Amino acid sequence: MREPRTGASYIDAMSDPFELNDDPAPSAAAAPGQPAAPWLDGLNPEQRLAVETTEGPVLVLSGAGTGKTRVLTTRLAHILMTRRARPWECLAVTFTNKAAREMRERIAAMIGPVAESLWLGTFHSLGVRLLRRHAEAVGLQSNFTILDTDDQLRLLKQIMEANGIDAKKWPAQSLLALIQRWKDRGLSPADVNAAEDTGFAAGRALALYAEYQSRLRVLNAVDFGDLLLHCLTLFRADAEVLARYQQQFRYILVDEYQDTNVAQYLWLRLLAMKHKNLCCVGDDDQSIYSWRGAEVGNILRFEHDFPGAKVVRLESNYRSTARILAAASGLIGHNAGRLGKTLRPGAGHAADGEKVSVRGVWDGEEEARYVVEEIEALQRAGHPLQGMAILVRASFQMREFEERLITTGVPYRVIGGPRFYERLEIRDALAYFRVVVQPSDGLAFERIVNTPKRGIGPATLQAMHVLARRQEVPLMEAARRLCETDELKAKARTALGGLIEDLLRWRSLLDGMPHPELAKTILDESGYTEMWQRERTPEAEGRLENLKELVRALEEYESLAAFLEHVSLVMENDERAEADRVNVMTLHGAKGLEFDVVFLPGWEEGVFPHQRALDESGLQGLEEERRLAYVGLTRARRRVFISHAANRRVYNQWQSSLPSRFIGEIPPEAVERSGQTGLYGGGTGEADVWGGGAGERWRQRPPTLIDAPSWRTVTPAQSGAFRVGDRVFHQKFGYGRVNAVDDNKLEIAFDKAGTKKVIDSFVEIA
């Protein structure tokens, strides 16, 4: 292999920069007559230990704001500068292209252009690099194509159609998600247990997966999951190739190890088996992507999987104040599934700072007013807007804050996604509403005519446009006239006629039905809601939540037309381009970012922790939600404002909300609490909100399976354990009394949430 030239850098001081040092543990300290080690300057003792512990498996537990990127780059430079390895003998893995670019730039600044010889990149980019070299071994050619999601879905739909599977009943998106989960676990079709193949198309998913992989090979194509799956197949099948790369990569470094999936873990483990110099940097307390396939167990089992591993804890935080760190550490300490570390301010860093502000408000609208008023006050005090962030648990929460920011003229940007009214599902829904209110709106009609799919293709759409221009009528009227002729195919004519009938019927209800109810009817009867329900992916669930929030927003306006006018003005106002803006995003999107001031709204049971996470994953879901709260707190450098509302309007119905259990888990000395009077009980003032009212009763209630691990575990009641008249407690709705029992279904009159039907496994005797 050609040796790259060196640049003007530390490495120039060496007479032969690529001659390896055979000493397994050469000292970095400067010996008489030898060059010093300036790359180690400025490291604290923890960071230096992580850099200099080069031999054997090393796990660097890097808390938020503790300088992990510096440790990674300095460690890599240290390995090269002490001649432990040549650049091409080092493998450095990141999770994003941005992180890879940043790391390469930092390394290049330290060692010069020789950094280009490093194997440095994301799992996927490194997988591509390997597969291009050995494509034939896995049945591909080296010029294979990498399919995007649209291409994957198109191919799966073709396969499903050929196998006679109803795509309406069994959406291709659901099959793709299932295949991706198998690939994340490193499972080829031959490796999948048949017992797992029961949830899709009556047990036909595995056969479809096998056919999909076969078709990909015929097309000389791969998807992103294949980039590692094929590497695993290659390594397992060809011992010579595996041995070659095991010998080459003397040192392996991995960033964000807590976010690795099973396939990535297996890939790393195979490559590290010879030299065993695997250094993984991560934070088990920031593992928040299980829905993407991440396995927090990879980092928790590190010492077991790699015997003799050295664990280095980076606990000196250079971002947040002492009180913010105390709040975050106290909260995350309630998780049982963690290796344990306690953040503290780094030497010479911030003083105690302000306490974490926790405020209770009456409802969501009041919460938005409170947050924006605080933002305006901070701006008047000289704080730039770009240093502030509103971090929400779910995207549907953004709407009220966006509305308030627009009303007050405070500029903002949504990071990691479009603004609320710019989201795909919201634009589709608004298009339906626009056609109902104004049938002449051809652009809106064109958007929804085949959404969801009705079999109305480009030829039908072209015929409508031709007739509309020829007769100078709106597009919907042209469609109606076409349905009265034989110019369209029978299937398209029937589907188009049915849609027009629906639109006219919904229009006739404008004056007789409450407009929020009409909006819900339109979304349901059009099949649009069902379309997202069938997709069964995390993204689809978020879209459904956004649609529910859209319907709720209609309640604030006197008519559907008034609401649409408001949205038009909002969209126009959003086009202003100020540089200094408040940041609005989800907590998941905020990981890796930092701000001077962070607002954390919606800290209520059912919202945060999210009820779906608790219902689907129990204790594991709760612990991941708590890690997400920890991430939110540690985004802040100076101030944190937590808020919760006593009432939320959900599905056009007011519901009382309890403060999130996470609030009670923050150490009291790190918190300053305030709230409106009389929110949770018969008392008044702060003592009622945080003392003897319902908030305190929540913290003292009997635990359930999804409570914090420090509480004792209670087995859910068996079917038949409840009787009419029993006093019970439900995780989301609170206390109530059983009105009726139907097998494992209970009808309960809750004290604050009204009468609900629930499953008995989520209820316990009070």
Image (tube, grey):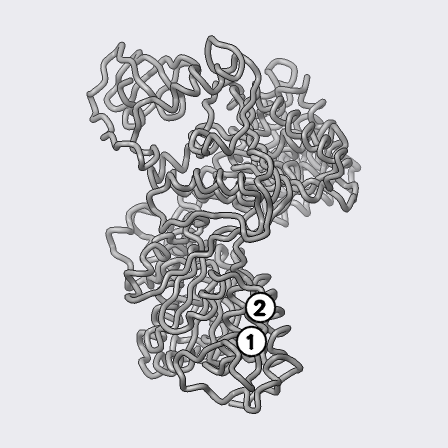
- Image coords of residue 741 (percent x, y): 26, 16
Residue 317 can be seen in this image: yes
| Residue 37 disc label | 1
- Image coords of residue 733 (percent x, y): 40, 21
Q: Secondary structure at mark 1?
A: loop
Residue at x 43% of width, y 29% of height: 664
- Image coords of residue 558 (percent x, y): 68, 17
| The one of 219 and 192 positioned closer to us in this rendering | 192
Residue at x 24% of width, y 51% of height: 195
Name the image quarter holding residue 546. Answer: top right
| The one of 82 and 152 positioned closer to us in this rendering | 82
Marks 1 & 2, CB-CB < 8 Å contact: yes
| The one of 167 and 424 positioned closer to us in this rendering | 424
Q: Amino acid at mark 1?
A: Ala
Residue bearing mark 2: 41
Residue at x 37% of width, y 13% of height: 749
**Disc 1 versus disc 2: distance between alpha carbons?**
7 Å
Q: Amino acid at mark 2?
A: Asp
User: Height in image: 374 above or below 111?
Assistant: above
Left or right position of 466 against 358: right
User: Height in image: 115 above or below 193?
Assistant: below
User: Height in image: 540 above or below 311?
Assistant: above
Residue 632 can be seen in this image: no
